[in-house]
């Protein structure tokens, strides 16, 4: 899981990373609302193709994308199976399992696929947002939208120290492996618990040091976020264009305005 | 529509089929886009008061101890990492991840666990495709509310009944994990059962989680107890330093 947690692509210079994060957040939110309120599979699938195509164009390795999508894909598989065998009335095929006969139904299979489409569509939007925007800028943008400053402050600290602690945990885990700490299941569990305990102990110690360092730099209980500049004309244009595009796609594909 | 008179053996056979899929090992959080908009909004509304109260708690404690905010951030980062550590689940032949809600609730209390969970889940949704932004409310409720409160409640009750702290921490980890998955199943079944039986859908999803979550809960119990044992043996004063935490 640690291998997936990489924000290196968010620091590349491209057309998407240059856009104000508030604009990207609003467009992503509108796209997510459109996808989860869609009643036909075409709109979510359209977003999936568009976002995944953009991710590929940005040069993100296909392996990383596939790894990130693996977990949600498996959740979708469960939902397709449940719906196929439990929902609907029109038989599709039968399956014999240890003397029990299961009948797959067409309506359920369609419902499962629709759900799967919705997951892929929504997921690809968030994937693109996460690849085009660094975490600290997303949190800054959230503060710009009046999200609680305590929440944003803790989020920024958490994000910063995940990577600091990750290095420490990596060293500890390597030392445990060298001492054959994971050779047997029981010993592995004890090592794993010690690793978790050591991580927490280290986080407590680091918290004191971090607070002292922050105080020396003028921290008096709250982080200053400063005034947020108004959106530039170009960014207002991108926002309007994005929202209009989503609305038009929804109107055409869901309400059938064009037809 | 789900057949209301579906025989129990069909439910069981479907559950057996589901056990062959690897998904429950990763299905700690509801994936992006699964919940329809009204359900997504409802779970946001349910989660909101818990996170808001947690933030109020954070403000109050930060006034008493100025280093408390960095502490919550750091403990949150540690718990995020612990929740990403792979645990092999022998019954599924794959790896899964602890939720960390039980140990978080013991260390920083259930209100702050909701805050930390909301941040961790946001990061996981954005950078790991684990959970989602539309399902964030539902995932906060299952992990940061149900998991945290059950873990904290079980720990407090077990200590009150005189159980040793190791056993209390084990039970807290175990039940907080199971509570997280039971709530996730409930949220999924409530949103997806359509015009059919909620009970059938709930049973199926719950059964799909059983092969991994039953052993994972036990492993999480040992992890919770083992981690606390480590802290108590090496730096017991750290547990006392957390004001109003479950272990102080």
Image: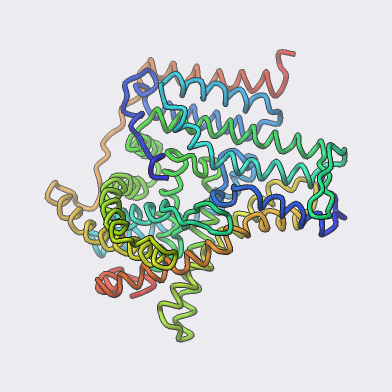
Q: Quadrant of the N terminus of chain B?
A: top right
Answer with left or right where residue B92 lies relative to residue B225: right
Answer with left or right where residue A113 lies relative to residue A105: left
How many circles with numbers are drawn on the protein?
Answer: 0
The image quarter containing residue B46 is: bottom right
Identity of the residue furthest to the left in this view: A216
Answer with left or right where residue B161 lies relative to residue B244: right
Residue drawn at point x = 39 percent, y = 52 percent: B80
Towards the viewer: B241 or B38: B241
Residue drawn at point x = 71 percent, y = 50 percent: B17
- Asked whether residue B88 appears in the rendered view, the answer is yes
Q: Quadrant of the C terminus of chain B?
A: bottom left
Vertical relation: A234 (above or below) A12: above
Identity of the residue furthest to the bottom in this view: B162
Name the spot of residue A74 as percent of width and height, x first: 60, 42
- Asked whether residue B150 appears in the rendered view, the answer is no
Vertical relation: A34 (above or below) B21: above
Residue drawn at point x = 28 percent, y = 75 percent: B233
């Amino acid at each position: 899981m640690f291998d997936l947690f990489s924000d290196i692509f968010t620091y590349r210079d491209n057309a998407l990373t240059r856009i104000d994060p508030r604009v990207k957040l609003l467009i992503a939110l509108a796209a997510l609302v459109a996808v989860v309120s869609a009643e036909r599979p075409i709109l979510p699938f359209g977003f999936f193709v568009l976002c995944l195509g953009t991710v590929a164009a940005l040069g993100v390795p296909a392996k990383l994308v596939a790894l990130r999508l693996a977990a949600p894909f498996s959740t979708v598989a469960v939902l397709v199976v449940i719906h196929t065998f439990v929902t609907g009335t029109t038989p599709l095929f039968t399956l014999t399992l240890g003397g029990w006969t299961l009948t797959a139904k067409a309506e359920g299979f369609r419902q499962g696929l629709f759900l799967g489409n919705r997951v892929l569509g929504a997921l690809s939007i968030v994937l693109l947002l996460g690849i085009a925007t660094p975490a600290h800028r997303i949190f800054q943008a959230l503060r710009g939208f009046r999200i609680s400053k305590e929440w944003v402050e803790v989020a920024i600290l958490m994000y910063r120290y995940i990577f600091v602690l990750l290095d420490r945990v990596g060293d500890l885990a390597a030392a445990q492996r060298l001492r054959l700490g994971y050779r047997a299941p029981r010993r592995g569990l004890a090592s794993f618990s010690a690793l978790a305990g050591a991580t927490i102990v280290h986080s407590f110690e680091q918290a004191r040091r971090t607070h002292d360092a922050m105080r020396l730099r003028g921290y008096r209980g709250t982080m200053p976020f400063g005034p947020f500049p108004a959106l530039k004309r170009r960014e207002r244009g991108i926002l309007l264009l994005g929202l209009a595009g989503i609305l038009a796609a929804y109107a055409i594909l869901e309400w059938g305005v064009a037809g | 529509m789900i057949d209301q008179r579906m025989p129990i053996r069909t439910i069981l056979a479907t559950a057996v089929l589901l056990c062959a899929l690897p998904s429950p090992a990763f299905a700690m959080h509801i994936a992006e886009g699964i919940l329809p908009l009204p359900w997504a909004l409802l779970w946001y509304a349910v989660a909101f008061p818990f996170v808001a109260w947690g933030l109020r708690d954070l403000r109050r404690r930060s006034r008493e101890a100025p280093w408390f905010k960095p502490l919550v951030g750091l403990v949150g980062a540690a718990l995020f990492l612990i929740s990403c550590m792979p645990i092999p689940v022998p019954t599924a032949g794959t790896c899964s991840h602890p939720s960390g809600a039980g140990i978080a609730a013991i260390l920083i209390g259930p209100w702050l666990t909701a805050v930390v969970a909301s941040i961790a889940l946001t990061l996981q949704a954005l950078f790991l495709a684990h959970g989602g932004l539309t399902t964030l409310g539902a995932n906060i409720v299952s992990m940061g509310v149900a998991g945290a409160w059950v873990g904290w409640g079980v720990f407090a009750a077990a200590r009150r009944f005189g159980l040793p702290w190791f056993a209390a921490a084990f039970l807290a980890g175990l039940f907080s994990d199971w509570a997280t998955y039971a709530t996730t199943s409930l949220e999924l079944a409530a949103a997806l059962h359509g015009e059919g039986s909620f009970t059938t859908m709930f049973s199926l999803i719950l059964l799909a989680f059983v092969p991994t979550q039953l052993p994972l809960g036990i492993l999480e119990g040992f992890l919770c107890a083992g981690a606390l044992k480590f802290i108590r043996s090496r730096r017991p004063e750290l547990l006392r330093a957390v004001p109003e935490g479950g272990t102080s």
